[in-house]
Amino acid sequence: MTDINVGTIARYCKPSTLDEQGKSTGSSFQLRLPNEKYLSVHLLDYFNQALERNNVSEVKNEMQRKGFSFKKTGVFVTLDIEKSKHYVAELISETISYKELGLPHCGLFHNNDDLLISELLAQCVNGHYSVTQI
Amino acid sequence: MTSLAIADAGCFEASVVMMKMADKNKDYHFSSVNNHLIFEGRCDVFSLPFAVANNISSPDQDELNDGEQNYISDKHRFIKELENLKHLEGILNFPKNYFFENNQRIVKRLNTLINAYDENIGASLESLKSMLIFLITLKINFKHPVITLNENGTFQINWKQNNLNLVTLRFKENNSVDYVIFKPSQYTKNPIVLNGNMNIFDFIEQSHGLGIVYLIQGLNR
């Protein structure tokens, strides 16, 4: 699997993982099952649109094509790959990695405490896009 | 002399009586609702919350007074009641009788989360019970936390002042909790990071020593 070291990724956050204002939390970045190896994300740069919103919209279309169904109150969030890797390294001296899984699909991999990493990733969120607004 | 309710302890009420109001240092006197003395002393007014925290944590079994004994017996009673509940609806209704008015919002929030959750594995009733036992036995009137339901079915709560000052708890079965604590450091711009797993009652007792009570504690009833 090829590492991705620069760019922006989007992740879909389910409604029960959002706070009461509809913003992502650490819950939005947790592995679903103990044996899962990565968090599922999509590389926005793959679509090469000028506006981030349009790239996120392309991710939504891509996921829908593959049969994913969205909840109206779900949101997409975006993170900068380089900044998130740097932030985790700076605060806890650990590494996370983004790897290609058949672009635009990517995986966010780490071998650390899921709760701790998820909290740090939640702090790296740049953009919020409601599913109904893209 | 002014009486000021500053803390709720679930099953006993603590009130502080302040004297010598012109003086920076205050005498304090904590009593249960039946007026039995729990503890008293003297400290700087800014240290009062810490004095309270230190005194209501880890009670010595040999020195328990009526208020504390009532609290502990009530705690065991509602833990047993909750453990006997087998259905989600009953568990969701349970905290209505135990939370103070400003914490009733939690009941509404839990219902919202359950309705929003659509994973095949189902929400963990054991995690929900652990969270409710934690909140009910917390011994302080807490600020409304951010409550979320993880994709794996476990419930999570978070109290946060800012990115470098927060506590996040993920509740599991058998009254176990995963925790992440960020605290400001006096020596570096990066926070102190604490994480691990503990029994919820150990966590409640350790939370005073960890210095996170101020993040959790609310002043309004």
Image (cartoon, rainbow, N blue to C red):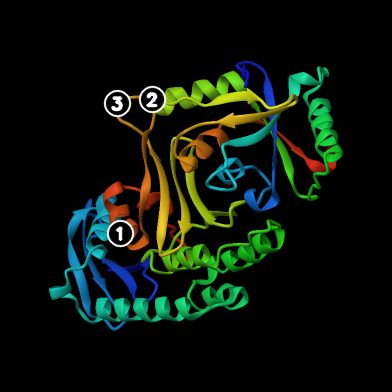
**Dot 1, how many residues are within 10 Å of its Cα: few (below 14), some (14-19), or many (20+)?**
few
Q: Residue A80: tell me if it is visible.
A: no
**Dot 2, how many residues are within 10 Å of its Cα: few (below 14), some (14-19), or many (20+)?**
few
At 44% from the left and 58% from the top, the residue drawn is B218
Q: CA distance from mark 2 to mark 1?
A: 29 Å
The image quadrant that residue A127 belongs to is top right
At 59% from the left and 68% from the top, the residue drawn is B107
Residue nearest the observer in this picture, B32 or A33: A33
Between disc 2 and disc 1, whose residue precedes?
2
Say which chain tag 3 marks. B
The image's mark for residue B202 is 1
**The residue under label 2 is which amino acid type?**
Lys
x and y percent of residue B182 in the render?
Answer: 40, 39
Say which chain tag 1 marks. B
Work out whether disc 3 and disc 1 sit on a shared chain: yes
The image's mark for residue A88 is none
Q: CA distance from mark 3 to mark 2?
A: 7 Å
| Closer to viewer: mark 2 or mark 1 | 1
At 38% from the left and 64% from the top, the residue drawn is B138
**The residue under label 3 is which amino acid type?**
Tyr
Q: CA distance from mark 3 to mark 1?
A: 28 Å
The residue carrying mark 2 is B189
The residue carrying mark 3 is B187
The image quadrant that residue A79 belongs to is top right
Between disc 3 and disc 1, whose residue precedes?
3
Above or below for B94 versus B44: below
| Closer to viewer: mark 3 or mark 1 | 1
Classify residue A52 as left or right of residue B144: right
Work out whether disc 3 and disc 2 sit on a shared chain: yes
x and y percent of residue B50 in the render?
Answer: 27, 53
Residue nearest the observer in this picture, A36 or A121: A36
**Dot 3, how many residues are within 10 Å of its Cα: few (below 14), some (14-19), or many (20+)?**
few
